[in-house]
Amino acid sequence: MKKILIVDDQLEVRELVEVTLRSGDYAILKAENGKTAVDIARAEKPDLIIMDIMMPGSPDGLEATKIIKSDPGTRECKVVMLTGKGQAVDREKGFEAGADDYFIKPFSPLELINKIEEFLE
């Protein structure tokens, strides 16, 4: 079973993404901040991480992605940014941090599912 880590400081967003993914056979992990995301990624080695950028505390989603992608134990995890930051410069920063893809909130659940299935095939 593929593991997916959902990282967002908003409970409603984590729950929406989890409901969106229920159609698949995934083990769902959740984190409310970047530090917890890095800890879970190191412990669980998820196949895919859905990462928000703007979260309170440190690291934020960009920095957490950099940490995950620079760690030999977690660098193979795919990271999809799911964020309200939709400017071209924000997308660039996401990809520079190591993101494999970038989705803007509000998002299409169908598009997100299709992208996740593409990454996890």
Image (cartoon, rainbow, N blue to C red):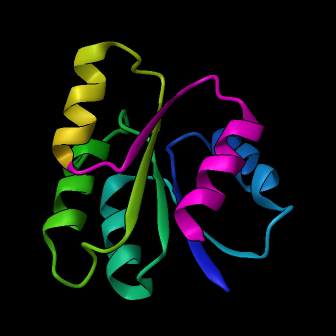
Image-based side of 109 in relation to 8, left or right? right
Residue drawn at the location 65% of the way across and 40% of the way down: 13
Q: Is residue 34 above or below residue 110?
A: below
Q: Which of these two is toward me, 59 or 78?
A: 78
Residue drawn at the location 29% of the way across and 15% of the way down: 88
Indicate the position of residue 41 as horizontal and vertical percent values: 37, 75
Residue drawn at the location 77% of the way across and 39% of the way down: 110
User: Residue pushed farthest right?
Assistant: 23
Q: Quadrant of residue 38?
A: bottom left
Decide whether residue 106 is among the magenta residues. Answer: yes
Residue drawn at the location 24% of the way across and 66% of the way down: 68
Instruction: State the count of labels.
Output: 0
User: Residue pushed farthest top?
Assistant: 87
Image-based side of 60 in relation to 105, left or right? left
Q: Which of these two is toward me, 15 or 49?
A: 49
- Is residue 52 among the parts visible in the rendering? yes
Decide whether residue 8 is among the magenta residues. Answer: no
Q: Which of these two is toward me, 8 or 89?
A: 89
Q: Is residue 47 above or below residue 95?
A: below
Q: Is residue 2 above or below residue 7?
A: below
Indicate the position of residue 62 as horizontal and vertical percent values: 25, 43
Q: Which of these two is toward me, 63 or 48?
A: 48
Quadrant of the image containing the C terminus: bottom right
Indicate the position of residue 97 as horizontal and vertical percent values: 19, 46
Indicate the position of residue 54 as horizontal and vertical percent values: 36, 33
- Is residue 30 among the parts visible in the rendering? no
Quadrant of the image containing the N terminus: bottom right
Segment colored magenta:
98-121
Q: Quadrant of residue 71?
A: bottom left
